Image (cartoon, rainbow, N blue to C red):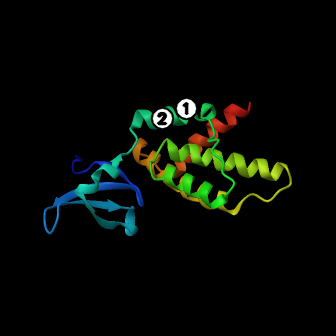
């Protein structure tokens, strides 16, 4: 089970903080999603707590950033774009490192399409946007820094790998 103050990954919301527990009318975990003026309180059934998992650790987050260049893109393909999109959206629900892999995969697919003078599938940008948001949020939480700082760390890794 989780403890108060622990950061967890909610499949629909991303990073949340456990703020308490309620017993009535059914056992619930009290979660807080978002930051600043956008904070939202959620009640999550204890019976479904297996769908929640702890956010990435500081060490794992730093290792993921340090080895970003070595991270393989996901090779999943399907003839139907809707099935592909569903597959990647399911991965996003798992949190890092899956969200980071999805970001890298979508960027790679967009770049490959553009290099062949084709228009990238519209789902690429939708999935990229959500995976990027969740990646930055979770890694910033793990590293106790801003999302902008995490973005700069990734940019430095990309620049170093291109040299």
Residue at image coords 83%, 56%: 118
Residue at image coords 23%, 56%: 46
User: Would you identify the image quadrant in which residue 47 lies?
Assistant: bottom left
Residue at image coords 77%, 47%: 112
The CA span between labels 2 and 1 is 6 Å
Residue position marked by numbered label 2 in the rendering? 62
Q: Secondary structure at mark 1?
A: helix
| Residue 16 locus on image (x, y percent) | 35, 56
State the residue in front, 45 or 104: 45
Q: Residue furthest right?
A: 117
Q: Is residue 146 left or right of residue 157?
A: left
| Residue 157 locus on image (x, y percent) | 62, 36
Q: Is residue 66 left or right of residue 117?
A: left
Residue position marked by numbered label 1 in the rendering? 66
Mark 2 vs 1: CB contact within 8 A: yes
Q: Residues within 10 Å of mark 1 (few under 14, many from 20)?
A: some
Q: Is residue 73 left or right of residue 62?
A: right
Q: Secondary structure at mark 2?
A: helix
């Amino acid at each position: 089970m989780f403890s108060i103050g622990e950061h967890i990954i909610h499949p629909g919301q991303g990073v949340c903080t456990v703020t308490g527990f309620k017993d009535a009318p059914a056992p619930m975990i009290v979660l807080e999603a978002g930051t600043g003026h956008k904070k939202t309180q959620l009640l999550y059934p204890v019976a479904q707590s297996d769908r929640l998992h702890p956010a990435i650790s500081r060490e794992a987050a730093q290792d993921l950033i340090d080895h970003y260049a070595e991270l393989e893109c996901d090779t999943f393909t399907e003839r139907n774009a809707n099935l592909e999109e569903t597959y990647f959206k399911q991965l996003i629900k798992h949190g890092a490192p899956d969200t980071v892999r999805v970001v890298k995969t979508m960027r790679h697919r967009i770049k490959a399409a553009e290099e062949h003078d084709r228009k990238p599938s519209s789902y690429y940008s939708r999935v990229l946007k959500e995976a990027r948001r969740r990646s930055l949020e979770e890694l910033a939480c793990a590293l106790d820094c801003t999302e902008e700082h995490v973005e700069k760390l990734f940019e430095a890794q990309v620049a170093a790998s291109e040299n």
